[in-house]
Image: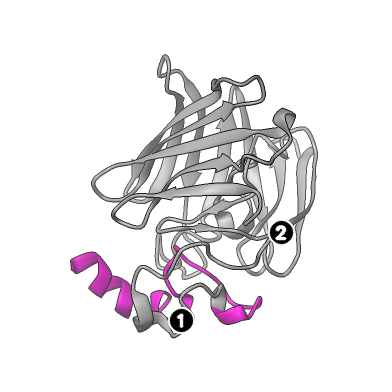
Amino acid sequence: DGRWVYTWDAENRLVKVESVGTSPAASKRKVEWVYDPRGRRVQQTTYDLSGGSAVVTENLKFVYDGWKCLAELNATNNALVRHYAWGLDLSGTMDGAGGVGGLLWMRSGPAVYFCQYDGNGNVVGLVQGNGAQVAVYEYDPFGRTLRATGSQAKNNPFRFSTKRANDTTDFVLYEYRVYDPNAGRWPSRDPIDEVGGINLYGFVGNNPNGKEGNGVSSKQAMGKQAMGSYLNS
């Protein structure tokens, strides 16, 4: 795409992106992901390549309850970095909408930050217990971040569609594939193939009023029919 070289594993999961060779030296980066047998991302490592060698700038492990991230640990010493509490998502259940709109709060250090949402389950703000606004987000219709301000705006990784944002790549990390909001499409094909529709790379059917649950076609996944077939295959 002019920015990154992509590496995929045999399960069509993105395991590495690295700046293209023509990128300015000062901006060269690399990000790697490790998956568990269920396909969950359990480690994310970010490298600075600007000096000609790979220097680790962040190395996180992820702890889950099902598909919901409960905590992030420093992969070097297992120190707690952040942890999270989840409630009902937009479906009115714990995971019927893939957790979209379901994150209640994030704890980072001694402080707890509560999530504010719009009608599509995008995190649009964080407030402390005393009511202080510590983050404000705005997005374009396909999820590109237009505004991220406040002391905790970058510290909170869960933003558009209540999914993890990767600030190095600008990708949104859905459970089953990554999304590129700058392109408004998925870089990889739908894991359930044409069961979810003929456009294997289209985001919410190119309808920004739609909701994407977990990275398989929202048309099918929100009704769970195709998702159940995929998980049981």
Disc 1: which residue: 219
Residue shown at 31% from the left, 77% from the top: 226
The residue closer to the viewer here, 101 or 8, is 8
Q: Secondary structure at mark 2?
A: loop
Identified by mark 1, the residue type is: Lys
The residue closer to the viewer here, 73 or 172, is 172
Label 1 crowd bin: few (<14), some (14–19), many (20+), radius 10 Å: some
44 in the magenta segment: no
222 in the magenta segment: yes
**Which residue is most to the top?**
77
The C terminus lies in which quarter of the figure? bottom left
Quadrant in the rendering for residue 78: top left
- Res 79 visible: yes
The boundaries of the magenta stretch are 205-233
The residue closer to the viewer here, 86 or 77, is 77
Residue shown at 72% from the left, 42% from the top: 127
Q: Secondary structure at mark 1?
A: helix
Is 76 on the left or on the right of 39, as rendered? right
The N terminus lies in which quarter of the figure? bottom right
Question: Where 223 sits versus 128, above or below?
Answer: below
Counting from the top left corner in percent of width and height, residue 85 is at 48, 43
**Which residue is most to the bottom?**
198
- Which numbered marker is on residue 144? 2
Identified by mark 2, the residue type is: Arg
